[in-house]
Image: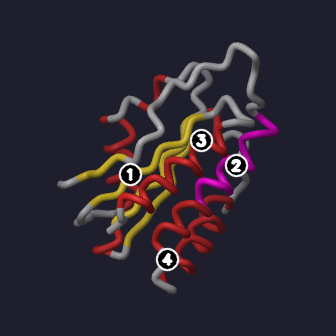
Amino acid sequence: MLTPQESDRVVESIRSAEKSTSAEIRVCIARKCKCDPLEAALKKFRQLRMEETALRNAVLIYVAPDSHKAAILGDAGISKIAGAGFWDEVLEEMISLFKDGDICGGICRGVEKAGELMKNCFPVSESDVNELNNDVVWDEE
């Protein structure tokens, strides 16, 4: 799915995106996804307790490459600022890269687009705390 170097690249893209925002971004890569990817993303979002950020401004990028499925889920604070179809557009960009065999590049592009959206509405403050781990979450279910 991802090499250790690609996983490091994803983590670095999350760190970079979060430098200019108080929002939190997580990436989950699943071996398989047997259901609707948005349902799987919501389940993982809750398992990771992502709804517990202070400003409800967390985003989960969920990818199941072997099942050819992906979803992006934003918490309540993010949903208020993301326009209709924003996440669909981001997913289209990601999937375009996936189809070219660039899973890592697609994920990083999704992280970058999420960071761009959030930096204006959730700017980083001097007292900002990284509320969620930046590591890639591997879902073996």
Q: Which mark is residue 82?
A: 2
Say which quarter of the image contains residue 120: top right
Of labels 1 and 2, earlier in sequence is 1
* Alpha carbon distance from label 1 to label 2: 21 Å
| Nearest to N terminus: mark 3 or mark 2 | 3
- Which residue is the site of mark 4? 102
Q: Quadrant of the N terminus?
A: bottom left
Q: How many marks?
A: 4
What residue sits 44% from the left and 62% below the top? 6
Q: How many angstroms separate mark 2 from mark 4 (CA)?
A: 26 Å
Mark closer to the chain start, 2 or 4: 2
Q: Nearer the viewer, mark 1 or mark 2?
A: 1
Q: Position of residue 47 (x, y in %)?
A: 30, 35
- Along the polypeptide, which appears first: circle 1 or circle 3? 3
- The stretch in magenta equals 110-121
Q: Residue furthest left?
A: 141
Q: Amino acid at mark 3?
A: Arg
Query: Residue beneath label 3, please?
Result: 15
Q: Does label 4 or label 3 sit earlier along the sequence? A: 3
Q: Is residue 114 magenta?
A: yes
The residue that label 1 is drawn on is 28
Circles 1 and 2, Cβ within 8 Å, touching? The answer is no
